[in-house]
Image (cartoon, rainbow, N blue to C red):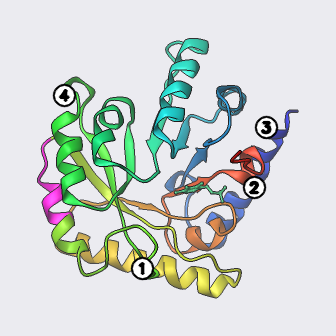
Amino acid sequence: MSIIAANLQAVEATIGEAVQAASRARGEVQLLAVSKTFPAEAVLEAMASGQRAFGENYLQEALDKIANVAQAQPGSEIEWHFIGPIQSNKTRPIAASFHWVHTVERLKIAQRLSEQRPPELGPLNICLQVNISGEASKSGATEAELPELARAVAQLPNLRLRGLMAIPEQASDPAQQRAAFARLRQLHDALRAEGLALDTLSMGMSGDMAAAIAEGATIVRIGSAIFGARNYD
Ligand SMILES: *Cc1c(COP(=O)(O)O)cnc(C)c1O
């Protein structure tokens, strides 16, 4: 078995234990394999194990990889998720090449994605990124900005607002991890109570997926636990 296949099995086991501990169903949690910095061959290996959803952070790298994977496996139904910071002059290729965007934090970016989404592709699935730990350096809308942003994004014609995403401050203490994820869930539930049809909590990475699942994650974004340590050189 390849390393990636074995890693996927181990991640699947961790997710399985976490959903069971939370009395949730396995089908409530989607595994997003974060393939940034890894080549198309790594994606193809994960696909051989049945993985179909992949997350990318860097646009040019992602566009090359999407083309290479499509060429190697024509017709395969891959779901590509953009999970990196978005520059406003790069929204057009994001709108055309991805199924999901997790990192919308400003209305202007959402408006551009909606205007530039090719209509034949159907609505682009959107999560709003929230700065849950409140650190000045981290990206994401503030909790105060969130309700107005969510209401405005929900009105845009070629987007489908699905939910919220966060990257909380790293913590090794599971109780601290859970507190941040619980906060995102509360914000999600508050927007639902206002009438927004949200169904997605994108939270949890390699180091904290169990805590995120315990607090209601519906998408966990897992990179290094599947593909190994990243090398940014
Ligand atoms: C890189 C990245 C991940 C994956 O992180 P790991 O710790 O390697 O699992 C998840 N989400 C986002 C937004 C990322 O940038």
Please name the residue that numbered disc 1 is placed on: 136
Camera-nearest label, 4 or 1:
1
Q: Crowding near pointer 1: few (<14 within 10 Å), some, many (20+)?
A: few
Q: CA distance from mark 2 to mark 1?
A: 36 Å
Q: Which residue is mark 4?
A: 119
Looking at the picture, how far across and down is residue 40, in whole percent?
A: 64, 27
Give the alpha-carbon distance from disc 4 to disc 3, as whole Å: 36 Å
- Secondary structure, magenta segment, majority class: helix
> Which of the two residues, 62 or 172, is positioned nearer the viewer here?
62
- What residue is disc 2 on? 13
Q: Is residue 104 left or right of residue 112?
A: right
- Report the amino acid beneath label 3: Ala
Q: Amino acid at mark 2?
A: Ala
Viewer-closest of 145 and 73: 145
First in residue order: circle 2 vs circle 1: 2
| Label 3 CA crowd tier, 10 Å (few <14, some 14–19, many 20+) | some
Q: Quadrant of residue 85?
A: bottom left
Q: Nearer the viewer, mark 4 or mark 2?
A: 4
State yes or no: discs 3 and 1 in contact (Cβ < 8 Å).
no
Amino acid type, label 1: Ala
> Label 2 neighbourhood size at 10 Å, few (<14), some (14-19), many (20+)?
few
